[in-house]
Amino acid sequence: MKKQYNYKDIKEFYHSGEFSPLMPNDYSHRHFRVKTVDKNWVRIPRKIRSQEELIRWINKTGGIDIYYSTSLWSSPEKVRSEKEYLKKPVSDNRLIKNDLVFDIDGEEPITINSLEKARMITNNLYEAMKNYPNYKFRTVEFSGYKGFRLTYKDNNPLPADTKLRVPYLRAKRECFVEQIKNYIITRIKEKDPRYYSLNTVFDEKITTNPFCVIRVLGTAHSTTKFISSEISILDITKPVKEITKNIPFVGSKSFRIPREREMTQETRQELPRSRLSKPEVEQLKDGSTSKPLNEEAVKFFYTNKVIGCKNGYVPFLIYQSKQKYLREVKRLQKKYSLGPLTILTQDNKIYVVSVKLMQYEQLVNLLLETKCINKSSYAKHKRSRIPITANKEKVIHGELIGGASKAHAKIYSINHNELSGKQELEITKAQ
């Protein structure tokens, strides 16, 4: 039978003068939401401007578990899901910044032993992050139950074009996750004494997804009634039992975290399995790693593939900066009814983009009529790509007849009635 929890003491704590949630940096640009006794999510529909205002909303909504966004938004009270965000104009709610957060949970079932592994992974990540000066360390935290968190200020710039920020950030973070995991494996192989020999497992969604939320420090975890707390960086070198005995809690008696040997076989079968995959285990055993990526050398591109449309693409024409291209693209624009052509430049190249939806064979025939430098590679790889950070120079206006890519039309602010495909762009990376 599922255990029934009594949340009365948490509610009393939130109404008491002792309750003092630690407000995150730049909290007026953070989105806040709560989870109620019934496990329902409730969004706080106002911009939070003070600790007192947050406390009022917690008690008004009946929140038990309290969360805030890892991102800064121009209108945080409007933040919903990523799906809802993509449906509306980006100008309604611009992504300003996103914290780099590592959320390190112990393997299920949660025991002292699994928390020890989470502590060791936290230590490894902290040591590795010393090599990345663009990320400024902020806090190490005990979440209140499953493990630990590391938070950093990300000082890397985002694209000036606000429409590109979400896909750019996601792609860059996915690259960074791969990079830091490989770096830690390398340090373990070289027997660096600062690193524990175990796999680097954490909730990568929290690190890569700018729409994620994390628990507010100073609020209670409804499962254990421990208060989510900032701890000293020196604490992650200590045994978990020493850490948890100094964590404040709500109520008269603290939650007792069992050791591995105290878990019954029946309990083990009911609890979910670990997120640690077999390939990750084997990777550490045989010492094999992919070549670590240099973050500064990695570039991100979006491609002309239309996600959600089988065999669907849009025309990307790439020229050397010295090539004469205008007469050629205007002729193609008229012949194929390509609609508005967006001209971008970067690294001595000129990029011409139409959002018209075309089949692969149609696009190959169009490219064969051009002197663009990507026609051979497109026929071979079925992809053309443009740097996310390319600079928009101008638009050559024209009539678009037929369908258009929904995602590409959104990026280039092209209005058209017949849109196809998903809202997402395909992002690639390269050194």
Image (tube, helix red, strand yellow):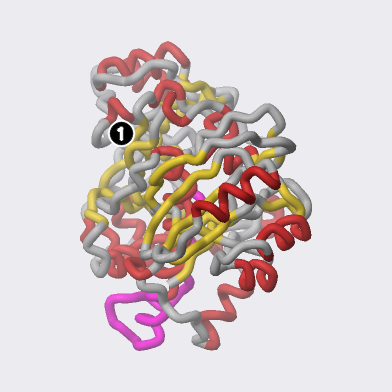
Badge 1 density bin: few <14, some 14–19, many ≥20, Cα 10 Å: many
Residue at image position (54%, 84%) is: 285
Above or below, 198 relative to 7: below
Q: Quadrant of the C terminus?
A: bottom left
Label count reads 1
Report the magenta residues as a range.
183-207
Residue 4: name its quadrant.
top right
Q: Quadrant of the N terminus?
A: top right
Position of 414 with respect to 102 (left or right) is: right
Position of 291 with respect to 82 (left or right) is: left
Q: Position of residue 424 (x, y in %)?
A: 60, 44
Residue at image position (26%, 19%) is: 49
Q: Which residue is mark 1?
A: 218
Q: Nearer the viewer, residue 163 or 123?
A: 163
Using the rendered image of the protein, determine whether residue 31 is visible from the camera's viewpoint.
Answer: yes
On whether residue 196 falls in the magenta region, the answer is: yes
Q: Position of residue 9 (x, y in %)?
A: 41, 23
Q: Position of residue 276 (x, y in %)?
A: 58, 65
Q: Nearer the viewer, residue 219 or 363?
A: 363
Q: Position of residue 343 (x, y in %)?
A: 46, 48
Q: Nearer the viewer, residue 303 or 415?
A: 415
Residue at image position (34%, 35%) is: 72
Q: Give the amino acid type for the residue marked by disc 1 in the picture.
A: Gly
Residue 293: name its quadrant.
bottom left
Dot 1: element: loop
Q: Nearer the viewer, residue 324 or 187?
A: 324
Above or below, 140 relative to 196: above
On whether residue 406 falls in the magenta region, the answer is: no
Residue at image position (30%, 83%) is: 192
Using the rendered image of the protein, determine whether residue 146 is visible from the camera's viewpoint.
Answer: no
Above or below, 136 relative to 283: above
